[in-house]
Image (cartoon, rainbow, N blue to C red):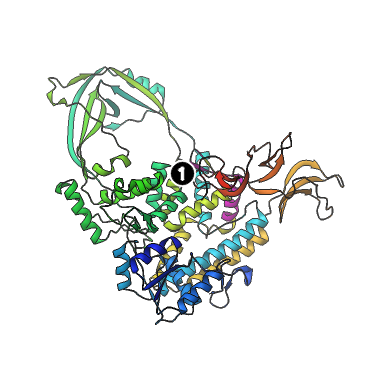
């Protein structure tokens, strides 16, 4: 019998069914090893010995490894079938190394979808572990460990923050920079003038041939005084234009679409997509409904394209078939596998709706119709532009009518657009039309908006920062650390978020920035392609980074502890809030001369960080003696809970999860943790 090792336990039954009784399919339950926390700075990396990593078994995985070794010893061959990306390649290598396999003992198989044909075909063309992909993942892990450990310790000793990271700190900087742009923005007044007609509106654009900019009400009134209600039609332009179709989903565009259409957080979207990828019981079979969901490729397989085109001809007609769209090449794209698509074009969302939860149905539907739409013809609109004259003041009205729905026949509900229909002036007996009214409107320029989850992910991707699979985690971390808060679904940096960003920019501006982080992604890609040496990349980084860390430890000003407004009963100096091993406590500012510590009922009852202000949620008692959990920053912060918070945040709304009986549920919405 042959042994097949996958990452997720939920895949084993389905894949085992496809392969038959000659194979035993087991799971590693994700990573089995990680960097140790020993050695210099606890990095688990031998920096002086060419950055040799020191791996240790992850807590709780010893029994998993024991079982894997036992199964491997009883097998003819071991097939490593972890996920088809760099992380999956690294997991396969760790299993290979831990189980002491050799090249004749094992094969590496990859499949982009969990369907019978994809899995069986993968086993017909196995390969060996790609060590370049492994080195790329190892390098990323070591970079993240070095930056994370060193900067986090620095932040903990010098600021009110708890962590910093290679990508998370750049994401936070984008949010902080945007907030400062908004705060510094000075609105400028401007006015517009419109002619109001029974069926449309026309906006003033020019005086003769010069573009008009109206900066005050006085200027607007002056123009209005020169206008009459009679407008002359100068020209009518009608052009048929293509309304370009859509590309299939990548990880980031799926996250953006689900955020915009369903108000799903990135983590929730990925959790649902993972389930759809791994396998769903649809009555007649258990099958993966979508291809691998961690991808930045826009490619679709030839087989899927052929099947989709047949489906389109059968259900819509030949005129609806579109050419396979070619993506614009952008930096840092990994084309190891396909875009996200359904595993079968014939498995429509409606046909399997009864087997899906409402949220699963939403995500599957948008993936299905996006992939289908990407292979359909462009829509066509008749665009009409009317130019009107009023005493040499030129007005313009535009509209469009859909004349061929093309891809919109399946994707219209996901596209925000409305037809604006203009009258057919061709039949008018005169080229003069009379307006109902002419109005002026005051406006003010607005700053760039705050980032939402969707727009921040879009920005990170466009800048070449991070990887699609990391975006959800990055957003969760900066929320969990209370570096940002959400208001109307928009990120607003907290006081700690500003502080962390400013300190990092003071000492690490040449590393914690967009360009350096994007270039690092390029280096990781080059390592994966065997075009760059990983030791050289790590050494170059470390020789720049570590001297900056040492300088920051020496010179960064430590944040003064917050005064409580009370005085020490022993020496009369102010009492301050300090942070120790067990959380925050009140003590004398004259330490170590005076070692007074205020005895408080709740001194060691810190539950977790307050998501609103970054202080601690502590156990308290109401006037009637009932236990509740509130912020120790009261009355500045009035966050409070009757159920005990767990410290985790809700993947739907980012509120704290609480212990409610035997359940873990959201303190704000209907989410219940499984």
The secondary structure type at the circle numbered 1 is loop
Camera-side residue: 162 or 159?
A: 162
Residue 168 seen by the camera: yes
In-image side of 84 versus 310 (left or right): right
Camera-side residue: 470 or 179?
A: 470
Which of the 4 image quarters holds residue 49? bottom right
Residue range highlighted in magenta: 487-505
Q: Quadrant of the N terminus?
A: bottom left
Residue ID at (45%, 40%): 449
Vertical arrangement, residue 548 with respect to residue 65, above or below: above
Which of the 4 image quarters holds residue 153? bottom right
Residue 523 seen by the camera: no
Task: Name, please, the residue furthest toward the right.
Answer: 570
Is residue 83 in the magenta section?
A: no
Q: Residue at label 1? A: 452
Vertical arrangement, residue 93 with respect to residue 439, above or below: below
Residue neighbourhood size for the residue with mark 1, other residues' Cα within 10 Å, grouped as few (<14), some (14–19), many (≥20): many
Location of residue 546 in the rendering, given as x and y in whole percent from the top left corner: 59, 67
Residue ID at (25%, 42%): 408
């Amino acid at each position: 019998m042959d042994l097949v090792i996958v990452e997720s336990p939920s895949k084993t039954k389905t894949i085992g069914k496809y392969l038959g009784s000659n194979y035993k399919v087991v799971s590693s339950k994700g990573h089995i090893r990680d960097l140790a926390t020993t050695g210099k700075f606890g990095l688990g990396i031998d920096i002086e010995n060419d950055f040799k990593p020191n791996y240790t078994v992850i807590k709780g995985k010893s029994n998993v490894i024991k079982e894997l070794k036992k199964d491997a010893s009883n097998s003819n061959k071991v097939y490593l079938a972890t996920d088809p990306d760099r992380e999956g390649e690294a997991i396969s290598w760790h299993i290979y190394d831990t189980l002491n396999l050799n090249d004749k003992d094992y094969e590496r198989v990859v499949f982009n979808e969990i369907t019978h044909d994809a899995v069986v075909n993968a086993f017909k063309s196995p390969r060996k572990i790609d060590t370049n992909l492994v080195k790329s993942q190892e390098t990323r892990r070591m970079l993240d460990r070095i930056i994370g450990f060193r900067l986090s310790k620095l932040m903990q000793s010098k600021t009110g923050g708890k962590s910093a990271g290679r990508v998370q700190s750049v994401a936070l900087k984008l949010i902080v920079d945007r907030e400062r742009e908004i705060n510094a923005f000075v609105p400028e007044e401007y006015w517009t003038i419109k002619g109001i007609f029974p069926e449309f509106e026309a906006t003033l654009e020019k005086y003769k041939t010069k573009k008009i900019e109206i900066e005050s009400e006085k200027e607007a009134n002056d123009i209005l005084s020169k206008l009459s209600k009679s407008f002359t039609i100068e020209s009518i332009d009608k052009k048929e234009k293509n309304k370009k179709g859509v590309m299939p989903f990548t990880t980031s565009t799926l996250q953006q679409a689900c955020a915009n259409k369903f108000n799903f957080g990135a983590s929730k979207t990925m959790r649902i997509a993972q389930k759809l990828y791994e396998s769903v019981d649809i009555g007649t079979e258990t099958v993966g409904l979508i291809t691998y969901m961690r991808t930045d490729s826009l490619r679709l397989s030839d087989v899927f394209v052929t099947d989709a085109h047949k489906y389109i001809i059968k259900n819509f007609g030949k005129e609806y078939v579109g050419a396979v769209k070619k993506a614009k090449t952008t930096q840092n794209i990994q084309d190891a596998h396909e875009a996200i698509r359904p595993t079968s074009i014939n498995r429509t969302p409606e046909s399997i709706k009864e087997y899906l939860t409402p949220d699963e149905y939403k995500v599957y539907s948008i993936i299905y119709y996006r992939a289908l739409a990407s292979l359909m013809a462009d829509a066509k609109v008749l665009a009409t532009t009317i130019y009107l004259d009023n005493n040499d003041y030129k007005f313009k009205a535009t509209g469009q009518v859909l004349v061929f729905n093309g891809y919109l026949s399946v994707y219209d509900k996901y596209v925000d657009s409305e037809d604006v229909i203009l009258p057919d002036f061709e039949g008018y007996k005169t080229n003069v039309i009379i307006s109902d009214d002419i109005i002026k409107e005051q406006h003010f320029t607005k700053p760039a908006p705050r980032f939402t989850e969707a727009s921040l992910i879009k920005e990170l991707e466009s800048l070449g920062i991070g990887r699609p699979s990391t975006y959800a985690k990055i957003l969760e971390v900066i929320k969990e650390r209370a570096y940002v808060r959400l208001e109307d679904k928009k990120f607003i940096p907290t006081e700690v978020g500003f502080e962390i960003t400013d300190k990092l920019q003071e000492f690490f501006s040449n590393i914690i920035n967009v360009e350096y982080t994007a270039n690092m992604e390029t280096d990781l890609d080059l390592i994966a392609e065997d075009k760059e040496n990983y030791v050289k990349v790590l050494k170059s980084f470390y020789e720049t980074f570590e001297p900056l860390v040492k300088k920051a430890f020496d010179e960064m000003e430590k944040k003064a502890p917050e005064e409580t407004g009370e005085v020490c009963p022993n020496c009369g100096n102010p009492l301050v809030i300090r942070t120790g091993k067990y959380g925050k406590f009140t003590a004398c500012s004259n330490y170590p001369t005076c070692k007074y510590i205020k005895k408080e009922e709740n001194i060691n009852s810190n539950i977790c960080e307050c998501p609103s202000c970054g202080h601690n949620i502590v156990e308290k008692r109401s006037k009637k003696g009932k236990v509740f959990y509130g912020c120790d920053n009261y009355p500045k912060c009035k966050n409070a809970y009757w159920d005990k918070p767990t410290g985790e945040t809700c993947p739907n709304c980012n509120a704290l999860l609480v212990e409610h009986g035997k359940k873990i549920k959201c303190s704000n919405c209907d989410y219940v943790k499984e």
